[in-house]
Amino acid sequence: MPTRPQAPAIQVQGLEKSYGKLRVLRGVEFGVARGSIFALLGSNGAGKTTVVRILSTLLKADAGTAGVNGFDVATQAADVRESISLTGQFAAVDEILSGRENLVLVARLRHLKGPGKIADDLLERFSLADAGARKVSTYSGGMRRRLDIAMSLIGNPPVIFLDEPTTGLDPQARLEVWQAVRELAGQGTTVLLTTQYLDEAEHLADRIAILHEGRIIVNGTLTELKQLLPPAKVEYVEKQPTLEDVFLALVGADSKDRNVGTNA
């Protein structure tokens, strides 16, 4: 697989994209270090998915440059596609097949040797070995998403794009996906994560860029972003009584006295 270790994993400069009169991206710039998790944080419509589509060669930018794994997305698209994997907002798995069969199918489509072993290794890596023989239709949301991410890693791409990977998942499933993402970066994979969830970016990312109305308005580590605000101050806040406080204040003591020495 083509690779250029000296280049940053992802480099974006002056990226522009418009749809008619609607300017979706307005000079977006950022870089992503190899083996790190970079979160592109923004609300719906901020342009996150547009950035990912350009970086994955699915969409052409109107202006600016973008490089992935040292290759230009416009002039070296084939090399970029060999270097990446893209996981969209919804799990792209075949529910009729088992988890293992999904993985074997993708490995065979990529003409890799030992598709069965590749599948077994990924099932073990993503804690799906016990469910590997089951149809995906029986999987929970978190299991489907973990399988989807496992499928995207077949061929060991150095860069993976996760476009809002926890959309629609319950809290437990989100935690499962978070753990899978951490393990990816821990093994050297560069992860660009788009999300609209503040806690997701806070828990996962080495660096966070906030995309707002087509522009990167801030880019830094979580510590650096927190330093943009004034230091925390301790303030006195008057606590309002709850109904439980009122009830105990009115009847609690008397009830305890009456119950002493009696069978309630």
Image (tube, rainbow, N blue to C red):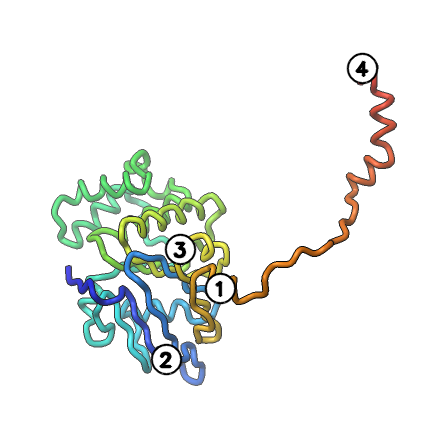
Q: Which residue is mark 3?
A: 165
Instruction: Examine the rendered structure and indicate whether residue 216 appears above or below residue 247.
Output: below
Which amino acid is tagged 2?
Glu
Q: Is residue 123 left or right of residue 198?
A: left
Instruction: Examine the rendered structure and indicate whether residue 6 appears above or below residue 153.
Output: below
The quadrant where residue 128 appears? top left
192 or 34: nearer the eye? Answer: 34
Quick one: label 1 or label 4, which is nearer the N terminus?
1
Q: Nearer the viewer, mark 2 or mark 3?
A: 2
Q: Which residue is mark 2?
A: 16
| Residue 237: percent from left, percent from top | 73, 54
Q: Nearer the viewer, mark 3 or mark 4?
A: 4
C-alpha span from label 1 to label 2: 25 Å
Q: Which residue is mark 4?
A: 263
Instruction: Examine the rendered structure and indicate whether residue 104 appears above or below residue 109.
Output: above
Element type where label 3 sits in the image: loop
Q: Which residue is mark 1?
A: 225
The quadrant where residue 66 appears? bottom left
| Residue 161: percent from left, percent from top | 32, 60
In this rendering, the count of numbered labels is 4
The quadrant where residue 17 appears? bottom left
Element type where label 4 sits in the image: loop
| Residue 159: percent from left, percent from top | 27, 59
Which amino acid is tagged 3?
Pro
Badge 1: residue crowd in 10 Å (few <14, some 14–19, many ≥20): some
